[in-house]
Image (tube, rainbow, N blue to C red):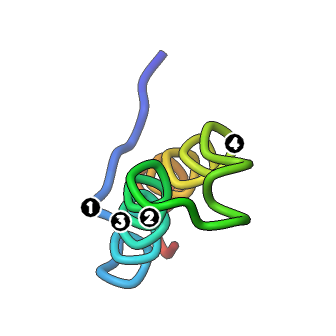
C-alpha cells in the first residue's frame, strides 16, 4: 500500500493537542467530562491527527 502523507494543518494539530492536554490534566485534577471519557477522548485526538496526515486539506 502506498500512502500519500501530508503535514496536518496547524488548526488540526492544535485541536488534537488541546484535547490530549485536557485529558492529561483531567487525569491529574478531576474534571467531570475529561476524566470519565479519557481513553475515548485520547483516541479521538489521535484520529483527528491521523486524519490530518492522511487527508490533504484537513
The residue wearing badge 2 is 16
Residue 13 placement (x, y as % from top left): 35, 69
CA gap between label 4 and label 1 equals 24 Å
Who's the residue at 36% across and 63% down the image? Answer: 21
Could you say whether the residue bearing mark 2 is in a helix, strand or loop? Answer: helix
* Circle 4 residues within 10 Å: few <14, some 14–19, many ≥20: few
Q: Which mark is residue 25?
A: none
The residue wearing badge 3 is 17
The residue wearing badge 4 is 40
Q: Which one is nearer the viewer's eye here, 51 or 37?
A: 37
Q: Looking at this rendering, what residue extends furthest in the bottom direction?
A: 11
Residue 50 placement (x, y as % from top left): 48, 46
**First in sequence: mark 4 vs mark 3:** 3
**First in sequence: mark 4 vs mark 1:** 1
Who's the residue at 38% across and 52% down the image? Answer: 28
Q: Is residue 28 left or right of residue 47?
A: left
Q: Give the foreground label among 4 and 1.
A: 4
Who's the residue at 49% across and 59% down the image? Answer: 26
Residue 35 placement (x, y as % from top left): 62, 52
Could you say whether the residue bearing mark 1 is in a helix, strand or loop? Answer: loop
**First in sequence: mark 4 vs mark 2:** 2
Q: Give the foreground label among 2 and 1.
A: 2
Residue 37 placement (x, y as % from top left): 72, 48
CA gap between label 4 and label 2 equals 13 Å
* Circle 2 residues within 10 Å: few <14, some 14–19, many ≥20: many
Q: Which one is nearer the viewer's eye here, 13 or 19?
A: 19
CA gap between label 2 and label 1 equals 14 Å
Report if the CB atoms under discs 2 and 1 are less than 8 Å apart.
no
Report if the CB atoms under discs 4 and 3 are less than 8 Å apart.
no
Amino acid at each position: 500500500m502506498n500512502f500519500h502523507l501530508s503535514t496536518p494543518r496547524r488548526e488540526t494539530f492544535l485541536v488534537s493537542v488541546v484535547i490530549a492536554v485536557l485529558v492529561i490534566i483531567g487525569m491529574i485534577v478531576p474534571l467531570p467530562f475529561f476524566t470519565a471519557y479519557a481513553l475515548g477522548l485520547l483516541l479521538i485526538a489521535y484520529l483527528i491527527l491521523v486524519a490530518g496526515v492522511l487527508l490533504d486539506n484537513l
